[in-house]
Image (cartoon, grey):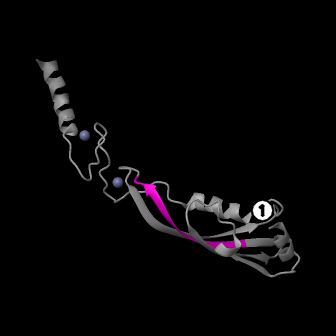
Amino acid sequence: MVEILRKILNNTIKTYKFDNDSLDMSKFETPLKVSGSIEKEGNALVLKFEVLSHYKLNCYRCLEVVEDDFGFSHEEVIEDDFEEFELEKAINDEIYLQKPSRVLCKEDCCGLCPECGINLNHEECDCSEKRTNGIFDDLSDLFS
Ligand SMILES: [Zn+2]
Ligand SMILES: [Zn+2]
């Protein structure tokens, strides 16, 4: 990578283009499509890329698996740390930042019952009823 960056900086090559075929994608957890380029701009290098991927995450309320596509484009300037620069790592770091962390299976997901743990989207339980009654029982104890 450093070699390529030097070549661009020295104007030996103009642009370095990359995609899945030129990257080592083995480190990535999810299958993804990447395409981008590194170009010289003044004394700096500009890295641009686009990522298209697919995630499988657990709904933040009910823990059911949610699958969806996600994608983004990113642009950054590499100024001094050429020697340290690793393209795959830069892409991976950005994916971690952009990846949705809290997803819901649907806007109004009912989540899990905090008492018995059933999925309230599919089933009903009488825990909340019991709880409410419990409060009234306590109150009636107070006033009896
Ligand atoms: Zn859910
Ligand atoms: Zn319950």
Residues in magenta?
47-59
Residue placed farthest to the left in the image?
144
Q: Is residue 51 magenta?
A: yes
Q: Residue 47 sits in which quadrant?
A: bottom right
Q: Secondary structure at mark 1?
A: loop
Type of amino acid under label 1: Phe
Lateral position of residue 137 relative to residue 94, left or right: left
Percent x, y for residue 77? 73, 68
Q: Residue at x 80, y 71 (%)?
A: 44
Q: Position of residue 82 (x, y in %)?
A: 82, 64
Find residue 127 and report its horizontal and vertical position in percent. 22, 37
Residue hosting label 1: 85
- Whether residue 4 sits left or right of residue 109 in the image: it is right
Q: Main secondary structure of the magenta part?
A: strand
Q: Residue furthest top?
A: 144
Vertical relation: 132 (above or below) 41: above
Task: Please give left or right for residue 104 compared with residue 91 in the image.
Answer: left
Q: Looking at the rendering, which quadrant does residue 40 occupy? A: bottom right
Q: Position of residue 31 (x, y in %)?
A: 56, 66
- Specify the quarter for ligand 1: bottom left
Residue drawn where x is 83% and y is 66% of the image: 2
Task: Judge by depth and name the residue closer to the eye, 45 or 52.
Answer: 52
Asked if ligand 1 lies within 8 A of label 1, the reply is no
